[in-house]
Structure formats: structure tokens, C-alpha cells
Amino acid sequence: MERLPKIGMRTVKTAVAVMACFFLFLPLQGLEEGSSGVLSPFYACIAAVICMQSSVGQSVRQGISRMIGTLLGGAMGLLVLLLDDWLERPVVTGLLLSGGVIAVIWLCNLLRRPAACSIGCVVLCVVILNHSGADRYWYTILRVGETLAGVAVAVAVNRLLPGGSPEEAGEKER
């Protein structure tokens, strides 16, 4: 009979970080009811899951890349949103979206942070495809802020809870 996998400390830390993000945003949910500015733990929880690594150092490095990608993707999204009148045309939206992806990836590589490319592109897509009218800038700020909060929570949980492996031990099973 095959042995069932155990639940490791990284799994526990990931779950604690997600729960902390949820509770962090619980009192803030719906504060901006009726607008695109609704605060939510969604992006914070995603960031916490991705940033939780086997060691605090790995979490910090992943978190820094995620923050850089998030800021670049959000900034590029805001630049594209300045052309909002043109976004009513799907062909233009597609072209601006693809141009923004190229710019984000190029900037991440310029900064020698290739690990930031994917999240930068995800944030860009979220901002461009999910924005809503006059609140589009506020929406971008909130989404970026939520992601950065998740990064901070993951690093804090990894640092505060026991069981982090030494740097050289490498990646362990969740």
C-alpha cells in the first residue's frame, strides 16, 4: 500500500498566511461597495501562496520579485488605461495588452528579475481587463496594494513560525 504524503510545515505556513490575509481584509471588504474599489483578500491570498517558500530567504527573494512585477504590471496597466477611450475597440485592447506584456517582460529582464515577469503580466492583464470606468486608477492601486500585503504576510508568517529549512537545503515538499 502506498504511503500517504504528510502535511509539512510549509503547507501549514501557507495555510496560516492565506488565513491571515483573509482576516486582514475581512473588516475592509465592501468598504467601497458599488464600485470597482471593493477591497478583497483575493490577490493577497494568491501572493501569499506563491511567496511561501521553504526558507525565509527564499520567501524574501520571491516576495521581492513579486513586488517588482506587481509594481511594473500595475504601472504599465495605468499607462495603458490612460488610453481608455481606445480600449472600447477590442483590436486596440488586444494590441495594447500585447505591447504592455512585451514592455513588462523587457523591464523585468532589464532589472535582472526574470522571476517578476509572470506576475507583472498577470497584474497588467488584471488592470486592463478588469478596470471599470472612473475608478480605474483606484482599482489599480487597490489590486497592487492587496498583492503587496499578501507578500508581506507570507514573509512574516515564514519568519515567525518555526520549521524553515536552511538556505542550502533547497526546495522541500509542501
Image (tube, grey):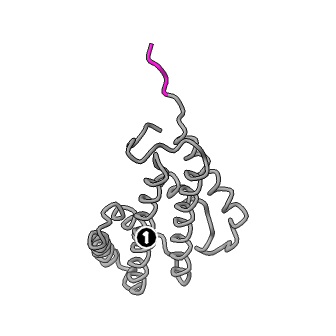
Residue shown at 53% from the left, 35% from the top? 8
Q: Position of residue 21 (x, y in %)?
A: 62, 57
Q: Is residue 110 above or below residue 170?
A: below
Left or right for 115, reference 48 = left
The N terminus: image quadrant:
top left
Residue shown at 54% from the left, 33% from the top? 7
Pick out the residue farthest to the right: 27
Quadrant in which residue 15 is drawn: top right
Q: Nearer the viewer, residue 42 or 166?
A: 166
Left or right for 8, reference 85 = right
Left or right for 96, reference 64 = left
Residue shown at 31% from the left, 77% from the top? 96
Quadrant in which residue 45 is drawn: bottom right
Q: Position of residue 60 (x, y in %)?
A: 46, 59
Say what secondary structure mark 1 lies in.
Answer: helix
Q: Position of residue 54 (x, y in %)?
A: 46, 45
Membership of 2 in magenta stretch? yes
Pick out the residue farthest to the top: 1
Membership of 118 in magenta stretch? no
Q: Which residues are magenta?
A: 1-5
Total count of labels: 1
Dot 1: within a 10 Å radius of its alpha carbon, few (fewer than 14), some, or many (20 or more) residues?
some
Instruction: Read off the residue under disc 1.
Output: 129
Amino acid type for the residue under numbered disc 1: Leu
Residue shown at 32% from the left, 66% from the top? 113
Q: Nearer the viewer, residue 86 or 145?
A: 145
- Magenta region, mostly helix, strand or loop? loop
Q: Position of residue 40 (x, y in %)?
A: 61, 63
